[in-house]
Image (cartoon, helix red, strand yellow):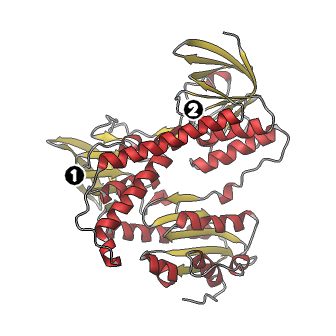
Amino acid sequence: MAEQNYDVLVIGAGPGGYVAAIRAAQLGFKTGCVDKHDKFGGTCLRVGCIPSKALLDASEKFAQARDHYASLGIKLGSVTLDLPTMLARKDKIVEQLTAGITGLLKKNKIDKLVGTARLLGAGKVELTTPAGAQMLSAKHIIIATGSTPVELPTLKFDGQTIINSNHALSLQSVPQRLVVIGAGAIGLEMASVWARLGSEVTVLEMLPTLCGGLADAEAARALEKALTKQGLNFYLEAKFTHTTPAADGVNVHFEWEGKTQSVPANVVLVAVGRKPYSEGLGARELGVQYDPKGRILVDSHFQTTVPGMYAIGDVIPGPMLAHKAEEDGIACVELLAGQAGHVDYAAVPAVVYTAPELAWVGLTQEQCTAAGRNVKIGKFAFRANGRALCMDETDGFVKIIADAQTDRILGGHIIGPHASSLLAEIAAVMAFGGSSEDLARTCHAHPTLPEAVKEAAMAVDGRAIHS
């Protein structure tokens, strides 16, 4: 087969990769996109962000119908779970979106290349497919291969009793007892899904707060309180040690408060983070430099230490988030085109899609204190927001941190209903270097949840109206 030549060849078709390919094509580059899976979309779309949200939304509606609708005057009688239908709906959503990506590639005249890529150097890539090997060449090669779940040495994934987040999306029955190791976003989201559907869930976390110390501590404590009310059991500052076999699963042993403890589990979800999927490409052999965590080192234009070779998303330093990867991909190809591509890493949002949701952007109060920043803080509770009361979702608050001298917003933290959507307003103001005064003087419709954001901004200056 004749060698195929490209201006830009993207290896990996997750959010970073396929978005980079589309933007490259828009900018006039002849573009190819490679992935080993026929269904493009990467971990996020196939076994991550999208299917997990499908289960989170469905399980939340199930729990509301079972536990809360009666208080709203809606009486349904017995509410029962149809797990196969719930899982089938999740799969249908994934199918629809992966097909959509294929359609976008076709629309933008991007070659969809399915197979395993290996870098050979000097703009050369070998693509291995079931039909054989094929040579590709490109002026610019972008590595966008994403990340994989971290496996603990003493807890090897078997897909049945010891599982990762991929497996947790496709359990064919509700475990009676589920132990989750790790209280980051993935662990908490999957813990919420299966707790709502009937599992007795225990979460072990090495750190003193949820979310790996990344979220504002006050907001993380509020989330812990809310999830505990929902039936989740937390052991913080707990150190997992080992498991022992049991008749219907394993016993999970850990150290907590100076004592050795154990809890039974039918299923153990290991959710202690993700690692770059950066090996096996041939990049290291060609001289691409990595950091000690296996992340590819790049310059301000996303170029690696090998000319003409670039990397974006989870394989480079920075938060392992789909939207960060998308921004990397767009900026990388715009810089290739001589434009001013840029990613503001100080304003990358993060979300935990539990109920209530926890979302944040920018600096936490703890980070400001550690850096010696003099700040002003405004807070507003959702229990004082009319729309939240009408929705019967009053847990949580909005917290805005501003520089004490300039009033520039340094961070925003929301725990409450639709926090993931509400956060965008704060991120937008931060992106333009805006102040809490700018946000406070923006007219918000009434009654709406975003009014809580406005009130928190007003509270920075001590002038909130409804608190």
* x 60%, y 69%: residue: 412
Outermost residue, left direction? 247
- Marking on residue 278: 2
Can residue 363 be seen by looking at this rendering? no
Q: How far across and how far down the image is residue 72, in percent?
A: 35, 77
Name above or below for residue 351 compared with residue 50: below
| Residue shown at the point (23%, 46%) measured from the top left | 266
Circle 1 is placed at which residue position?
176
Residue 312 versus residue 445: which sits nearer the camera? Answer: 445
Describe residue 247's horizontal placement relative to residue 122 as left or right: left
**Where's residue 324, x and y in %?**
63, 49
319 is higher (above) or lower (below) than 355: above
* Image coords of residue 377 (percent x, y): 61, 78
State the quadrant of the N terminus.
Answer: top right
Dividing the picture into quadrants, the one containing residue 99 is top right
Q: CA distance from mark 1 to mark 2?
A: 37 Å
Q: Secondary structure at mark 1?
A: loop
The one of 362 and 425 positioned closer to us in this rendering = 425
Q: Quadrant of the C terminus?
A: bottom right
Badge 1: residue crowd in 10 Å (few <14, some 14–19, many ≥20): some
Q: Is residue 122 above or below residue 204?
A: above
* Residue in the image at 63% along x and 14% along y: 134
Amino acid type, residue under disc 1 in the picture: Gln
Label 2 Cα neighbours within 10 Å, binned few <14 / some 14-19 / many ≥20: many
* 74 sits left or right of 354 in the view: left
Viewer-nearest residue: 389 or 156: 389
**Label 2 is placed on what type of residue?**
Ser
Q: Is residue 395 left or right of residue 12?
A: left
Q: Secondary structure at mark 2?
A: loop
First in sequence, mark 1 or 2: give its number. Answer: 1
Q: Residue at x 67, y 59 (%)?
A: 347
